[in-house]
Image (cartoon, rainbow, N blue to C red):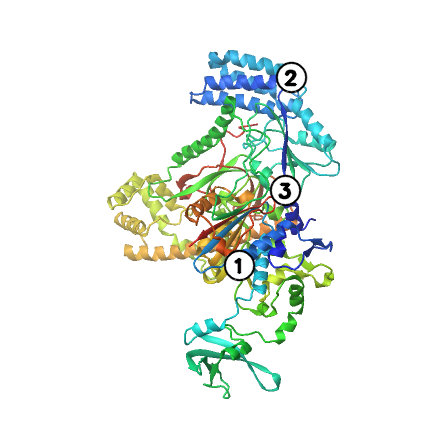
Amino acid sequence: MTGYFERASIKFKNSQSFVVNHQKISDFEPIRDVRKRVFLIFNMLRDAEDDNSRKINLQAWKLLTTIELSILPFDHKDLLLSEQLDALETEIAYFPAIKEAYQQLRNIVEWLRSNPNNPKREALHIKLKGCPQNKKIGVITRLTKWGKIAGWGGDTCRELSCMYEDCEFLNSASDFKANFYECIILPSAGGMCPLMKQIFSTYVSKEVFLIYYDREKRNLPEKKCPPPGSFGMKDSKDKNVLPLTPATDETWSVDDWIDITYWQRMREEFTKSEAGTNSNSGSEILVRARLVMLGDFKTAVLREDHRIIEISDLIEGHSNIEEFGKKFPRKLVKELKLGDLIVMRTSGSGDILDEVAKELMKREGQTALLTTALDWKIHLKQAFQDYSDGTLLIAEKLKNMGHLIRDPNYMWMWTTAYVIRPESKDLFFDLILVLHELDCDLPIADPLKYAQEKWSQMSVLLKYRMKAGRKIRELLLSRLRQVIERDDVIGNEYHLNLVGADGGELTIFRVSGIDSEQMSVPYSRTGVICEMKDQKWLD
Amino acid sequence: MGWLKEAGFLKDIYWVEGESRQRSILPDWASFLIWLGATMRRLQFEDMHIFCLALLPTRICGSALSAFGSLTNSLINSENELSWDLFLECEDGLKVYFIQPGKNGKKEQLEGELQCVNSRNGQKLRSIRIISRSKRFQDLIFQISESKFKDIKVAFHPHYPSRLLNHLHDLSNFFSRTLTNFNKNNLLMHDIESIVITNRAGWFRENSEILFGTVGADLSTFLSIKEILLTRFGRCHLCSPKSREIEILKSPLAILDGLDALRSRESIQARNFLILLDQEEYGEEAEDIFTQFSGYCLRKLSTDYGQLPTRCPDGIDVQFYAFR
């Protein structure tokens, strides 16, 4: 294994001779035509903001991206070109104005299917054959920010692996930590590739080779220089000269649209679900957070300044768990990268919380606490049932006493063990007063004395539950430690449960996308994991 | 450019890492980082703070190399010794330590308090009242003349026992073979030379297996850079960015290793700051900080402070931001 000093030396050496080479495929008209027709459709719907137009744009962009980024023959089944055309045709049924453009697009794609020689595929094979043997070559397989595109599944990589033994596939930022490569090949112009920063600034290779069509969207990161100070020292290289001359193309607006729309949609979906939960009473504190895509189409909004457990270095063997003692490495949410492995609590402690809490109470001779502390719930339930519209009656009385009761039905939750007590002491004391007023047979005649006693008992009960929560967390983290020590293979998600327990789950998620913009969200909504509704967005 | 020579080294340094035991001459980038550490330690002015940003292809091992540079600068620099003039100017009551030649050639270290300056026969004398439990020395007052001053090695910190120098045989040999004007006594200074703000686990991992040695030296005499720095003679203090220590420690040079360390810069008490960042981590946040620096710093670093080279090794970018 290469030592750290040697690794650093290789990186410095690579940076000195770093070169970006490229092969621009400019004599392949059909690809240009596909881009032109897609742009035509996109242009016609540019100002429409309805869902149907959006779907058409999305479908057309997917088709374009599949063809432009593919390294398979154009008639390969994995590209799903026929299916994509059909899907687009269905969407445009109510838009006669774009039927002609669609028909032209269909004709070109059909032509490609019957003339399947893919010039990008040929260029890639020529480059790979020309690479020196026994030197590792990295091929970037993560070409868009939004997950895999058709034709970039395991079969494509397997085919290349069989033909070129030294070929390795780079799909996430963490893949740049371990190895060095003779050359990194990017089969695109980088316009949508989320790994451009890593490709150009980690110096794991001295050469980057881009293969792209002349109209493909380009995005080569400029090497940044620090702003001028009182004195500066520079190396002898001219940093900002990269071999692709900066250019723009009006058709790139299709790619820009998808970039903006994707996260916009994600934010919209979050805001919609947020409105549905109605959790922000207006008084809840707002925090700055970012949307993070987790593994297989899950999302979460995480506080920007939160340090989350991130274990990719441990899993990939770049660091040792022993170095961290009892702790785990953490990373700021705003510094997360694609491919990072973060650990989140994915279920509450459920029944196991009660079990562990009961065990702790038993050990300290407090077995009766669970029943005595909560005996007021029986009287509340009785009152709900004994009076016609008991729920409304009690809610009304509490409102008259100055309390805010949004949903009277929610008070039924107070009769269960899920919610130990109302959120404020005043509310609880007034609730007991109301029960006393309604002639409920409280065990102690003085309602204030009774309320005080129950409130104290419930505080003790909550302390036991908190202790139990901490114990469960420790048990889960020790399970996590075992997983790391066993070198388990972690895919996109890995669940950790306590054996035989209902509830208490940790999940290791692979970060598959991070919103570059922050948003303000109610504190209570951060860390909640949601399934993406439009799951198969790019599949 | 001969960075090591510029930093006061006599000759090249060899490095060895891990089990390979294959020695190689220190590469240019590493020599440059040693020079940068030494330069930032050298550029110390009472009326000025200097922040130096070095953008690197990687900062692996970088902070250790710069801390090593900072240390070597102090080993060849004799300015730290207390001068007679300064001794006369020190305020009354200040604690000092000095060596008193005793019987049979034995030397004793004494602690005392400075008192007034007198004149006798046109010669200036400074009094030191001895603080000691020994009856022999209790309340004794020494009158120190300029000629005596040189012999008794007055310092603000206790002197290490001279037998300790024998224990420093390896270290002393290493530096005497590598540094021009190596002053063995400087190895025994007490002040912290540099604070390195870094991820401690990562730092130990990166630097645990690197050994430095000199041309022609036996491999067994090669020294670990980690051990050179972290023994009390290395006078390098390692802190994590969140550690409370950084608010207490004072140092002539703080080496901020990475973005997390840069964030903690306002809590650090240091004269100069050397900031090492990977090009990958030089994003919006760091750019904002240095754009502000750029707006407020002095337009030029005066040549009174010595000429600095304008070129650095390929792949590295360096900017100095000086503030009055």
Numbered label attached to residue A227: none
- Pinpoint the chain carrying mark 2: A
Q: Residue furthest left?
A: A400
Instruction: Tell which tag, 1 or 2, sits nearer the viewer.
Output: 1
Where residue A382 appears, as percent x and y from the top left, is 34, 45
Q: Are marks 1 and 2 on the same chain?
A: no
For the question of whether residue A322 can be seen, the reply is no
Residue designated by label 3: A16
Depth check, front residue: A412 or A69: A69
- Pinpoint the chain carrying mark 3: A
Where residue B126 appears, as percent x and y from the top left, is 45, 79
Depth check, front residue: A505 or B234: B234
Which image quarter: residue B291? top left
Depth check, front residue: B25 or B228: B25
As shown in the figure, which amino acid type bears the numbered disc 1? Arg
Q: Give the Cα distance between marks 3 and 2.
A: 44 Å
The kind of secondary structure element at disc 1 is helix
The kind of secondary structure element at disc 2 is helix
As shown in the figure, which amino acid type bears the numbered disc 3? Gln
Q: Give the Cα distance between marks 1 and 3.
A: 29 Å
Numbered label attached to residue B42: 1
Residue at x 49%, y 84% (from the top left corner)? B133
Q: Earlier in the sequence, mark 3 or mark 2?
A: 3
Where residue B65 appears, as percent x and y from the top left, is 60, 55
User: Is A442 positioned to the left or the right of A370 in the image?
Assistant: left
Instruction: Tell which tag, 1 or 3, sits nearer the viewer.
Output: 1
Crowding at dot 1, Cα within 10 Å, few <14 / some 14-19 / many 20+, comes out as: some
As shown in the figure, which amino acid type bears the numbered disc 2? Arg
Which image quarter: residue B179? bottom right
Which image quarter: residue A268? top left
The image shows residue B235, relative to residue B50, as above or below, that is below
